Image: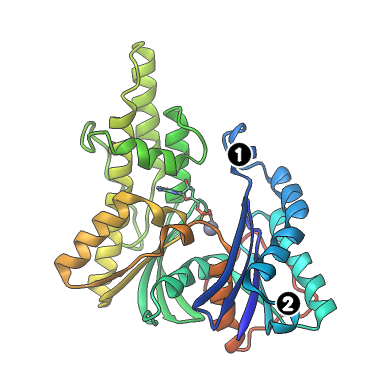
Amino acid sequence: MKLLAIESSCDETAAAVVEDGRKVLSNVVASQVEEHKIYGGVVPEIASRRHAEAVNAVTSQALEQAGVTLADISAIGVTYAPGLIGALLVGVNFAKGLAYSSGLPLVPVHHLRSHIAANYITHPELKPPFLCLVASGGHSHLVEVLDYTKFRVVGKTRDDAAGEALDKAARAMGLPYPGGLHLDRMAKGGNPNAFPMPHPRVTGSVYDFSFSGLKTAAVNLIHNFKQRGEELPVPDLAATFQNAVVGLLTEKTTAAAKNLGYKSIAIAGGVSANSCLRARMGEICSQNGWQLYLPELSLCGDNGAMVGAQAYYEFKSGNVAGLDLNAYATMQIED
Ligand code: KG4
Ligand code: ZN
């Protein structure tokens, strides 16, 4: 069964054709990064406009590269939540138009569910249940993936998302957007223990994260260097901050895996591309005899293939929307 999938939740306009949730026949991504770069972050209004300009061509390319037409497609999957509302609406409205004109079923896909599903593409043997750390620019969740469409959140961030904290710290260090990627590269030449960093504590769920204290500590360090008129030791700052963020993510993931009895651990979302996180989690999993699942690098950031993968399982479980489908800026992964 071949599904067409459309993604427009942030700053990538993407479309893909995916067979049976696992086999990618095409995956076209039009990135807006260069345009948002000059503003140091995503400008929602610009994102919406660029999606509207690109979505038709990106979808046509996805069908063409897969060597199919709409007649070969069984359903249309689309990201409808969470994300930038104006950006989501472009993809949702386009998908609705296509579903109406073709008579194909419309399948609504939750953005974080699709990030998790990127792992089904890279690892054909992966099946729920497993524990997944989902870390992106907007979310940091520890999720029990009970089934393909059944999730339980056991921990989440109380303030900034991991990616958001990395982006903000990178920006304070003078690194270009998207900060997380540049911080990762810069950290390779730095000392991860160059400066003391606080260890955030949260009350309530033992698996909850907090990144704003780390971010403030990094910003204060940078400020102090600037006040003294000293050159910023960017590689050391990047390595130290990244080490602290990765330390927190891996600590909570390890605790949840041990306490909840998971031996299959996955990571998903844009931050899953982080080389330090991938390496550290790899060490922890091999020490404990756990299996680690990571999406290939090209599927860590936003893309249509992951939407097509999750849409397949949503469709099989009967999740089909009417033409009154709306987009939502926020939505729990369990809903
Ligand atoms: O999932 P994603 O592409 O978009 C959202 O759904 O938010 O995640 C984007 C986030 C950004 O914060 C970006 O800086 C971060 O993923 N990111 C990274 C790396 N590549 C992207 N963070 C750390 N290391 C990377 N290599
Ligand atoms: Zn994302």
Residue drawn at x 36%, y 32% is 218
Residue position marked by numbered label 1 in the rendering:
34
Categorize mark 1 by other alpha carbons within 10 Å: few (<14), some (14-19), many (20+).
few
In the drawing, does residue 321 fall left or right of residue 265?
Answer: right
Query: Residue type at mark 1?
Result: Glu
Query: Residue type at mark 2?
Result: Thr
Residue drawn at x 31%, y 31% is 235
Up-down relation of residue 99 to residue 192 (above or below)? below
**Residue 303 coordinates in the image, percent (x, y):** 56, 61
The image quadrant of residue 192 is top left
Residue drawn at x 56%, y 80% is 19
The image quadrant of residue 122 is bottom left
Observer-nearest of 34 and 88: 34
Which of the two labelled residues, at mark 2 and mark 1, occupies the earlier sequence position? 1
CA gap, disc 2 and disc 1 = 31 Å
Under tag 1, what secondary structure?
A: helix
Q: Residue 69 carries which label?
A: 2
Up-down relation of residue 60 to residue 13 (above or below)? below
Tag nearer the camera, 2 or 1: 2
Q: Quadrant of the N terminus?
A: bottom right
Residue drawn at x 33%, y 62% is 207
Residue 102 in view, yes or no? yes
Up-down relation of residue 236 to residue 147 (above or below)? above
**Residue 254 coordinates in the image, percent (x, y):** 25, 64
In the drawing, does residue 228 fall left or right of residue 305?
Answer: left
In the drawing, does residue 212 fall left or right of residue 317?
Answer: left
Up-down relation of residue 33 to residue 312 (above or below)? above
The image quadrant of residue 79 is bottom right
Residue 214 in view, yes or no? no
